Image (tube, grey):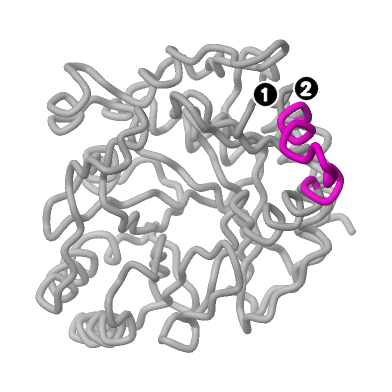
Amino acid sequence: MKHRIIAINLPQFHPFKENDEWWGKGFTEWTNVTKAKPRFHGHYQPHLPTETGFYDLRLPEARQMQADMAREAGIYGFCYYHYWFNGHQLMERPLEEILKTGEPDFPFMLCWANENWSRNWDGGFSKILIEQHYSAEDDINHMRFLCEHYFQDPRYMRVNNKPMFVVYKPDLIPNVRDCIDRWRNVAAEYGLELYLAYMTRTDDDYICKGFDCAIDFQPHSRPYLHDSIVKQILHFRSSNFFFRLYKHFVSNDHIPFNMNFQYSDYYRYMLDQTTQLSKKYPSVTPMWDNASRRKGWFFMLKKSTPALYKEWLKQTILKFIPYSNEENFVFINAWNEWAEGNHLEPDIKWGKSYLTATKEAIDECNIL
C-alpha cells in the first residue's frame, strides 16, 4: 500500500499589509533569512535559495514552481498553514489565488495556525500583534468559510471523501469538544463530513475529544529534549556541576543556553518511539536551525545531511502501516521554513540533494 507524502508549506513569502505595519515596508520571510549570521565557527547561516530564487508567492510562476518541484520529488501534496483570527486572515493571498485560478493542479490541505501572532522573531514574546478570540460564533463562521471555499475545491485532500482539516494547537481551544461538534454540524449543512487532525509533540490525546487522528510534529519532541538534558546533567554532576555544565555548552560548537542536538542521535531516537494513540501519522524533518528567527536562544539539530534525512524518511515510511487505503499520510516538516533552517527547496550548500533524497526514499520504499 503506497503512502501519501505531505510537505508542510509556509505561505508567508510575499509582502502584505500587516507585515508592512509590524515589521516595516516590504517585510517577508526572506527578510529574516537573509539577515542571519553564523553564531559559532562552522555554523551554516544564512540558508539561501538557489534554483527558486527569492520568490514571491503572489506570482503564479512561483506557486507552480513549488508544485512542480514537489511532484518531481514524489511528494503527493502540500499542507498549507491557514491564519484565521475571527474572520481576519493573514497571508491568505497565495491560497486565494490557488483557489481562483485552479493552478497549480496539486493536492493540498489546510492546517489552522491557531496561535496568537506575536513578536517572536525579535524576542518580544510578550507583545501580541493579533490575538485569537475563541467563541461559538467564530467556530461556526470559520467552518462556514472553509466549507464554502476550500472544501469545495477538487484538489483539496480527503479521506473517504471527507475533507481533512488540521489544527496546530488544539490545547489552545477552550472546550475543544464543543468546537468540534459545532464544526461537524456546520459541515453537515453543506453535505460534508470532516476528517479532523491535530498536530502533537507528545501523545496528548485529543482523539478522545472528537478529532479523528493526530500528526506527529517534528522536531519538537518533549520526551527527547527531556531525556537528553537529563543525561547531560547526570554526566556533569559533581561539586563543580555548574562550571562543568557551562564549559560543556560553550565547547564543541555549543552556544550557552541553547539547545543543540545531533541530527543523527535525534532521528534514531524518534525511530525507536511508539505511540499510544489510536491514529497518529508520522513525520520527519530534513534539518532544523531557527537562529535567524531568534536574537538570543535558538534550537538546532546539528550535522543534518541528505543521507541521514533519507534514512529517517525511508525507515519512517517502512515502519508506518496505513490505517486504511486512504489513511496513509507521512508528513515532512517542512517544504520551505527557510527562517527555521528547515526546508527541502534547494539551497547554496546542498543544492537539490534533499529533494533527491526524498525521491529516492519514496521510490525505494515502493519497490520493497
Q: Which residue is mark 1?
A: 352
The magenta-colored residue range is: 232-248
Assess disc 1: are there few (<14), some (14-19) or many (≥20) residues with their C-alpha within 10 Å of its C-alpha.
some
Whether 28 is drawn above or below 136: the answer is above
Q: Quadrant of residue 134?
A: bottom left
Q: Residue at x 67, y 50 (%)?
A: 284
Whether 96 is drawn above or below 24: the answer is below
Q: Is residue 340 visible?
A: yes
Q: Which residue is mark 2?
A: 251
The residue lying toward the viewer, choosing from 258 and 111, is 258
Whether 78 is drawn above or below 20: the answer is below
Query: What type of secondary structure mainly makes up the magenta span?
Result: helix
Q: Residue at x 17, y 47 (%)?
A: 130
Whether 95 is drawn above or below 306: the answer is below
Q: Residue at x 20, y 29 (%)?
A: 19
Across the whole image, how many numbered discs are drawn on residues? 2
Residue type at numbered disc 1: Lys
Assess disc 2: are there few (<14), some (14-19) or many (≥20) residues with their C-alpha within 10 Å of its C-alpha.
few
